[in-house]
């Protein structure tokens, strides 16, 4: 049988290090804390851990403003802690993926400190500096994702520099010949250490229009988030970005079995270009996985989701490996978006679609957005744009992991104030409580990940959608040669349905049900599906 890599057959579990486990009583999670929780992580049957940035950073964007690419932030520990964590992860047969943030640095990175020191500093053009417009304003109309212009004026040298996030995140200039090699060296530093790969931040933004032309207005803007006002034709998805990514991939290819997953928000036809070109050995020459974020963004109804899955499958170049994401540190929690009942359906979907699943810590227990009192709001887009803070603020999905019913849910010591608050209901929604409840979300999650790991059809098999004859129901088959076949039937609706799937088989065995109560062989010609019910059948 064909061999698959860990990043194809495995599951990626994202940890936001500030929020997983505090081991030193400062109210912020750390590497030693994660290390203490490896038994738990392993019990989830996931294969790789992706850590959001752990590098030195003044934390203006909570670590996505990197001041040193080759060190560990003292908040999280030191290099010895990282080495120990990596060793333990590998000893368990797991992989460790780090976040790489190549598009911008912190304004405290030594490269930018030099760059801003004078117009003739050799690193001046490592960043994107321009004279003011004739009226003294910014050089063009580009805007920041976090509100306001994408340019900040620097008094000392009388020019503006570009930043599409906070002003403490100046953007590197990949048109300067020395910048990419320097970033590739940072990658090699970690790959030499044995890191298994990178999640690459905003990879589709890494190149900007050379002439810095104004972006046209977006006629379809919904009037809510100002970043949507413009069509980002000069700041995103420029053709030349693929050359940069190919160079990054070539570095990964210098090592065995490493992986790069790119953060890209684009429609299918553009997204799939980030796999690159297929090579003779069947591999591609850009991202192993360009993140597919559709499940985070789509309206949650059976027809829309089915159409999206089918369209994505159809858009994939032959041999390109699919992937799916249910949540991340930038999007509201899936259990809050869909409700607890549909969050269970979503977990079945994620773990039974074809392609690598990525899920976000806490999803396995149905963690919800935590209401953040105004004095606790820390995330820059929310701080900068208070009127839309409830939409753009990301603190609610970054709160401490809920381990148990003890003070602060076991995240930190009792006397300490965690960096973000716990929800009022953590005593009833936590890992310990769900371990004891045989029908909990956690037990659903574990049974799904266990099944996926043991069944080739689910891990790496083919996908085909099936007409279920009810608008609320999305059904599909997963098959692999010589292996058990599976039928997945998901009711996205609030009503029960009786459906006929006898064309697939007359009867089938329920192996997992959302409620974790139903089992046994059922007839498929009059299959009764409860409201919000999802079923996984072995055929
Ligand atoms: C990515 C990260 C996000 C960060 C931004 C700037 O979108 O996921 O958290 O704020 O890039 O680095």
Image: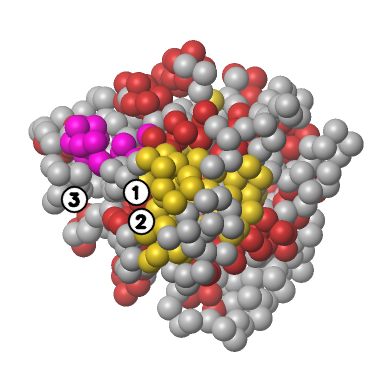
What residue do we see at 59% from left, 86% from top?
Answer: 219
Return the x and y of residue 375 as percentages of the image width and height.
20, 58
Q: Are marks 1 and 2 in contact (CB under 8 Å)?
A: yes
Q: Residues within 10 Å of mark 2 (few under 14, many from 20)?
A: many
Q: Secondary structure at mark 3?
A: loop
What residue do we see at 63% from left, 75% from top?
Answer: 231
The magenta segment? 430-446
Taking the magenta stretch, the answer to whether it contains residue 212 is no
Identify the mark nearer the N-term, 2 or 3.
Answer: 3
Look at mark 3 in the image and give the residue it sits on: 423
Q: Residues within 10 Å of mark 1 (few under 14, many from 20)?
A: many
Count every numbered label the image shows and give the total: 3
* Residue 514, numbered circle: 1
Identify the mark nearer the N-term, 1 or 3.
Answer: 3
Q: Nearer the viewer, mark 2 or mark 3?
A: 2
Return the x and y of residue 78 as percentages of the image width and height.
42, 22
Determine the CA span between mark 1 and mark 3: 25 Å
Return the x and y of residue 470 as percentages of the image width and height.
47, 70
Return the x and y of residue 389 as percentages of the image width and height.
33, 67
Taking the magenta stretch, the answer to whether it contains residue 444 is yes
Identify the mark nearer the N-term, 1 or 2.
Answer: 1
């Amino acid at each position: 049988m064909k061999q698959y890599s860990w990043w194809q057959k495995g599951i990626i579990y994202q940890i936001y290090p500030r929020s997983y486990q505090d081991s030193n009583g400062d109210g912020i999670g750390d590497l030693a804390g994660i290390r203490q929780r490896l038994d738990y992580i392993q019990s989830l049957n996931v294969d790789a851990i992706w850590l959001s940035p752990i590098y030195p950073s003044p934390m203006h964007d909570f670590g996505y403003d990197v001041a040193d690419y080759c060190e560990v932030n003292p908040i999280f520990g030191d290099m010895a802690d990282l080495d120990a964590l990596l060793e333990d992860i590998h000893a368990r047969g797991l992989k460790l993926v780090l976040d790489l943030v190549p598009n911008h640095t912190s304004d405290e990175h030594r490269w930018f400190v030099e760059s801003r020191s004078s117009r003739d500093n050799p690193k001046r053009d490592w960043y994107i500096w321009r004279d003011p417009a004739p009226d003294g304003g910014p050089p063009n109309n580009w805007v920041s994702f976090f509100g306001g212009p994408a340019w900040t004026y620097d008094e000392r040298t009388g020019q503006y520099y570009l930043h599409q996030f906070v002003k403490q995140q100046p953007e590197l200039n990949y048109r300067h010949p020395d910048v990419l090699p320097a970033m590739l060296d940072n990658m090699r530093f970690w790959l030499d250490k044995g890191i298994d790969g990178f999640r690459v931040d905003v990879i589709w933004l890494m190149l900007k229009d050379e002439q810095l032309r104004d972006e046209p207005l977006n006629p379809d803007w919904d009037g809510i988030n100002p970043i949507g006002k413009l069509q980002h034709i000069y700041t995103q998805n420029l053709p030349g970005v693929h050359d940069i990514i190919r160079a990054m991939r070539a570095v990964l290819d210098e090592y065995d079995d490493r992986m790069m997953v790119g953060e890209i928000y684009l429609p299918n036809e553009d997204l799939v270009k980030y796999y690159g070109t297929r090579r003779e050995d069947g591999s591609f020459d850009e991202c192993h996985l360009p993140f597919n974020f559709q499940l985070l963004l789509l309206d949650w109804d059976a027809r829309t989701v089915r159409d999206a899955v089918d369209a994505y499958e159809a858009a994939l170049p032959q041999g390109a490996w699919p992937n799916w994401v249910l949540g991340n540190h930038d999007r509201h929690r899936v259990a809050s978006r869909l409700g607890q009942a549909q969050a269970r359906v979503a977990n079945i979907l994620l773990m039974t679609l074809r392609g690598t699943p990525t899920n976000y810590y806490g999803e396995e227990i149905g963690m919800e957005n935590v209401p953040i009192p105004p004095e606790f709001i820390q995330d820059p887009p929310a701080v900068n744009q208070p009127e839309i803070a409830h939409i753009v603020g990301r603190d609610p999905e970054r709160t401490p992991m809920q381990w148990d019913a003890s003070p602060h849910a076991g995240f930190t010591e009792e006397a300490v104030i965690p960096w973000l608050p716990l929800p009022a209901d953590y005593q009833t929604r936590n890992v310990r409580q769900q371990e004891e409840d045989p029908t909990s979300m956690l037990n659903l999650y574990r049974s799904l990940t266990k099944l996926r790991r043991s069944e080739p059809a689910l891990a790496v098999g083919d996908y085909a959608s099936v007409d279920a004859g009810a608008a609320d129901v999305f059904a599909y088959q997963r098959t692999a040669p010589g292996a058990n076949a599976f039928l997945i039937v998901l009711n996205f609706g609030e009503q029960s349905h009786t459906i006929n799937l006898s064309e697939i088989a007359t009867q089938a065995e329920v192996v997992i049900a959302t409620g974790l109560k139903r089992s046994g062989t059922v007839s498929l010609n009059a299959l009764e599906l409860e409201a919000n019910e999802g079923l996984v059948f072995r055929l």
